[in-house]
Image (tube, grey):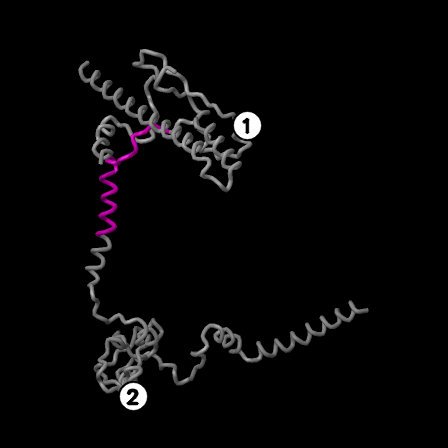
Amino acid sequence: MSSKCIVYGYMFLNVKMSSLLKRALFNNSQSIRKTAALFCNATRNHWNYQYQPGPYPKTPEERAAAAKKYGMTVEEYTPYPEDMGYGDYPKLPDIGEDSKDPHYPYDNPELKRNFNEPLHATAEIFGGDRCDISIRRRFSLLHQWTWFLGTLGGFALLMVFLEDYKIGRPVTAKQIPGQGVHYLFSPN
Amino acid sequence: MGQIMGGYHARSVDLNSDDNPTFDPQAGFQYERKQREMIAKEEDLISARIPNKYRDYCAHYLLDYQVCRYKEMPLLYRCAHEKHNYLNCEQQDYVLRMKEFERERRLRVRENRISATA
């Protein structure tokens, strides 16, 4: 009797759960993606249709309109190559936030950005606490590579050229009783 | 430093650490060399579970030392005599290996000298 109750309860739960789950997950076409995104990224979890850039500008009029939209002059506006899929978003110079002048009175000093200034396409990694590829290196790349390869190469050359000049203990192999006959150096 | 200075004389006859002797063991000796004998019995070694690399010609001293340790635990200072015996035996074994190395080196030098003059 009790086992039957358990079985019926299990079946009821299954049926009810499955219809509820189905409605929750599959009613809205974006909800699975949003659910996954919730677990992957709790803060950047929204999209506004105005965020999407326009199509790649082909005629000069389209370029002027795109430049005006992003608040740039026509001379300084260059889009990314068309096959990269950025549309008409401008290709801004790769300057990280850390390299920008700290004493200039920005409208938004936390981001070192003025009002309506276009954000770099990959601004999320150019932030002040993140990468900055335009920073002046303390040691140039050539210096770094020279020391790195020089050290490794130096050790490799040492090993190659001193292979025949190794030092060892002045002993023969260990004499193990079962393997071979061994003698003392005296008659008794 | 002596090892660095002396290494050349061994390397020049192509002799390196842990090589095996190549000459006849009896060559050059007026008397007959005594054979090394294994005093500890195989079944004792197996029963005491001595690891393979310690089953050499000094294993009987090792067995005595382990027996002493077992009996005197935790007052292990009382096994100093057995430990000294074992370590002495190991040292003599190492010295014998060094002698073999030097003998091998000198025989090779002699062979080179003979073949150079011949």
Work out whether residue B105 or residue A6 is closer to the camera in this orientation and state it.
Answer: B105
Amino acid on which disc 2 is placed: Phe
Name the residue located 34 percent from the left edge and 71 percent from the top edge.
Answer: A84
Describe residue A42's horizontal placement relative to residue A5 as left or right.
Answer: left
Work out whether residue A153 or residue B75 is closer to the camera in this orientation and state it.
Answer: B75
Q: Magenta segment: does it hold B39?
A: no
Label 1 sits on residue = B43
Quadrant of the rendered image containing residue A6: bottom right
Same chain shared by disc 2 and disc 1:
no
Describe residue B109's horizontal placement relative to residue B97 as left or right.
Answer: left
Q: Magenta segment: does it hold A151?
A: yes
* Secondary structure of the residue carrying numbered label 2: loop
Label 2 sits on residue = A115
How crowded is the residue under tag 1: few (<14 C-alpha within 10 Å), some, or many (20+)? few
Pointer 2 chain: A
Q: Residue furthest top?
A: B30
Pointer 1 chain: B
Tell me: residue A159, above or below residue A86. above
Q: How far from the left and from the top, in percent, is residue B107?
A: 27, 19
Name the residue located 23 percent from the left edge and 53 percent from the top edge.
Answer: A149
Q: How far from the left and from the top, in percent, is residue A80?
A: 30, 75
Amino acid on which disc 1 is placed: Glu
Quadrant of the rendered image containing residue A22: bottom right
Q: How far from the left and from the top, in percent, is residue A178?
A: 46, 25
Instruction: Give the extent of the magenta segment.
Output: A150-173
Task: Compute the Cα span from label 2 to label 1.
Answer: 90 Å
Q: Are marks 2 and 1 in contact (CB under 8 Å)?
A: no
Q: Main secondary structure of the magenta part?
A: helix
Q: How far from the left and from the top, in percent, is residue A179?
A: 44, 24
Foreground label between 2 and 1: 1
